[in-house]
């Protein structure tokens, strides 16, 4: 989550903070999922995706598309 906020801040040129609502039960699960991804035990095989769709987009590309879709300029 912080990585996405950091990329967004870089693209927007302003500070972006991560705020999770502790009342939302999904926030704990999402945090656990992100911890698992960052552990290095999750490795995606993108070879077939690359064959069909070309090279996978970077996280920065995906965040830029999201920010643009929300009406912000990057």
Image (tube, rainbow, N blue to C red):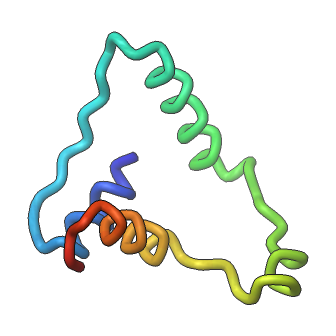
Residue 35 percent location from the top left of the image: 55, 38
* Quadrant of the rendered image containing residue 5: bottom left
Q: Is residue 2 left or right of residue 12?
A: right
- Work out whether 31 lies above or below 37: above
Q: Residue furthest left?
A: 14
The residue drawn where x is 24% and y is 34% is 19
Taking the image as shown, residue 15 lies to the left or right of residue 19, namely left
44 shown above or below 65: above
**x then y, percent, for residue 31:** 49, 31
Quadrant of image for the C terminus: bottom left
Viewer-proximal residue among 16 and 64: 64
- The residue under the point 11% across, 59% down is 15
Total number of numbered labels?
0
User: In front: 44, or 63?
Assistant: 63
Q: Is residue 18 left or right of residue 59?
A: left
Residue 48 point in image, percent of width and height: 90, 76
Residue at the location (63% across, 47% down)? Answer: 37
| Residue 51 in picture, x, y percent from top left | 87, 86
Q: Residue at x 60, y 35 (%)?
A: 33
């Amino acid at each position: 989550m912080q990585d996405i906020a950091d990329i967004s801040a870089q693209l927007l040129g302003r500070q972006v903070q991560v705020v999770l609502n502790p009342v939302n039960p999904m926030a704990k699960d999402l945090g656990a999922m992100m911890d698992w991804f960052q552990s290095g035990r999750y490795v995606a095989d993108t070879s077939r995706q690359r064959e069909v769709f070309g090279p996978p987009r970077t996280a920065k590309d995906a965040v830029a598309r999201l920010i643009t879709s929300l009406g912000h300029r990057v």
